[in-house]
Image (cartoon, helix red, strand yellow):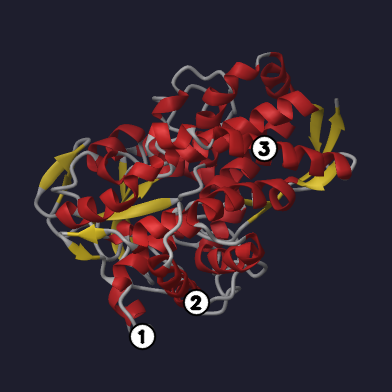
């Protein structure tokens, strides 16, 4: 499939699986709100992905996420543009992809343990100074542009990319390559960012980390790549393909989702000067505002689960074999949980119950790190910028798995 093949206008009949829909987010959220009013679960039949049930309300999504024994992850953990199934995808690859996103049960627990210590609160807190320094660099860049810039490309993309690459020990000169590959993986359908060949990009990334792993096994250093390269599972060195799956998730999800959350959050603040002033008046709101930004933007558009036995959720009877799509953007704007859900409220009292990072056993490893980066950036903006306004129309990536604002032209008045 070419990267532009799906872009033909809004398709409500393929609300969750048509990549072009996510370039028109106001329309998307309006249709999703109608679905929530009609019920918590809705059946879809898709030419590319077959039949599935979309879970659109917050409570129902939590209920599914809390029961991994009934609704586990599978190899087909998400609907990927141009790929109808895991088996179809594997036909085009010389190796089997194995990532945390497609694992469950004991296997998922074992591989998650390899890296989980690096993302625990104490470990993340040690990165605060480094993150604040990167935010200071971003503010200096903003000043060098006299307050006129594309927030997405100039700040939201490079900042979290640098954080995760430094954790992995990737040299700064290789960051442009990592950015290109991750965008080709997650934004494959986008005519500007993608190549239309996400798994070729994944293969190229795997080849890069094979070399880096070899170097770290020979000469270990104090970085996450060394920890993975020299770790064991069940007393044995990690299988290379599973190791490459870890790197694919860490190197891509470690910044793409955060970048989209930052860009979309600032776009929302630019449209609501009162909320930005509220943040300036009380920068301690930045931590809560980071959760609110993730709620409003929900860069991960969905994951899927496969029902193992007949069961009931939110009054709906699922049958064994039913495939379920968990819609995070819809759940995060559920009016039953979040009053006035389409508005960014930096002081929202229940912002922390947002599900933008998932829920349960598959809760995002890097959620705390992402929230630290977002809150640090918000504090930096509140300190350095008097006002922000859009200097053109934002643009959104074409993509129904992970996507968000890719261009946010801003005009800032500096302090």
Which image quadrant for residue 290? Answer: top right
Residue located beneath label 3 in the image? 133
Image quarter (top left, top right, bottom left or bottom right) of the C terminus: top right
User: How far apart are labels 1 and 3 at the CA level?
Assistant: 42 Å
Q: How crowded is mark 3: few (under 14 residues within 10 Å), some or many (20 or more)?
A: few
Q: Residue at x 39, y 44 (%)?
A: 118
Residue position for label 2 = 204
Residue 256 screen position, x and y as percent = 54, 53
Is 22 positioned to the left or the right of 238 in the image? right
**Residue 378, visible in the rendered structure:** yes
Task: Give the mark toward the camera: 1 or 3.
Answer: 3
Marks 1 and 3 close (CB-CB < 8 Å): no
Report how far apart the C-alphas of labels 2 and 3 lie in the structure. Answer: 31 Å
Q: What element carries label 2?
A: helix
- Within 10 Å of disc 2 (Cα), the crowding (few <14, some 14-19, many 20+) is some
Q: Could you tell which of marks 1 and 3 lies nearer the N-terminus?
A: 1
Left/right placement of residue 111 relative to residue 153 reads left
| Mark 2 touches mark 3? (CB < 8 Å) | no
Q: Residue 147, how many percent across, how many down?
A: 86, 39
* Tally of numbered discs: 3
Q: Name the residue under label 1.
A: 94
Q: Which of 228 and 355 is in front in this view?
A: 228
């Amino acid at each position: 499939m070419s990267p532009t093949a799906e872009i033909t206008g809004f398709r409500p009949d393929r609300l969750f699986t048509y990549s072009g829909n996510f370039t028109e987010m106001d329309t998307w959220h309006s249709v999703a709100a109608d679905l929530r009013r009609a019920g918590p679960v809705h059946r879809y039949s898709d030419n590319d992905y077959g039949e599935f049930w979309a879970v659109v309300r917050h409570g129902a999504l939590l209920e599914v996420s809390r029961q991994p024994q009934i609704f586990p992850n599978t190899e087909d953990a998400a609907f990927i543009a141009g790929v109808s199934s895991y088996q179809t995808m594997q036909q085009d690859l010389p190796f089997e992809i194995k990532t945390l996103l497609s694992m469950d049960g004991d296997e998922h627990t074992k591989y998650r343990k390899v890296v989980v210590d690096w993302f625990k609160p104490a470990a993340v807190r040690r990165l605060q100074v480094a993150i604040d320094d990167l935010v200071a660099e971003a503010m200096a860049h903003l000043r060098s542009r006299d307050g006129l810039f594309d927030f997405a490309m100039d700040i939201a993309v490079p900042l979290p990319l640098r954080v995760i690459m430094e954790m992995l020990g990737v040299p700064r000169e290789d960051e442009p390559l990592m950015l290109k590959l991750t965008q080709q993986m997650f934004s494959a359908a986008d005519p500007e960012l993608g190549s239309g060949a996400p798994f070729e990009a994944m293969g190229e990334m795997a080849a890069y980390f094979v070399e880096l792993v070899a170097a770290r096994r020979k000469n270990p250093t104090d970085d996450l790549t060394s920890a993975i390269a020299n770790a064991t599972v069940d007393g044995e060195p990690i299988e290379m393909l599973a190791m490459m799956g870890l790197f694919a998730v860490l190197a891509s999800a470690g910044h793409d989702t955060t970048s989209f959350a930052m860009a979309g959050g600032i776009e929302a603040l630019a449209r609501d000067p009162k909320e930005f002033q509220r943040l300036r008046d009380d920068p301690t709101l930045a931590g809560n505002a980071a959760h609110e930004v993730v709620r409003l933007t929900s860069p991960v558009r969905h994951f899927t689960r496969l029902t193992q036995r007949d069961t009931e959720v939110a009054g709906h009877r699922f049958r064994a074999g039913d495939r379920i799509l968990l819609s995070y953007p819809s759940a995060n704007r559920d009016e039953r949980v979040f009053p006035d859900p389409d508005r960014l409220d930096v002081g929202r009292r229940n912002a922390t119950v947002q599900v933008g990072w998932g829920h349960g056993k598959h809760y995002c490893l890097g959620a705390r790190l992402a929230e630290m980066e977002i809150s640090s950036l918000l504090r930096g903006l509140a300190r350095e910028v008097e006002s922000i306004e859009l200097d053109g129309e934002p643009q959104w990536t074409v993509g129904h798995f992970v996507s968000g604002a890719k261009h946010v032209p801003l005009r800032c008045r500096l302090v």
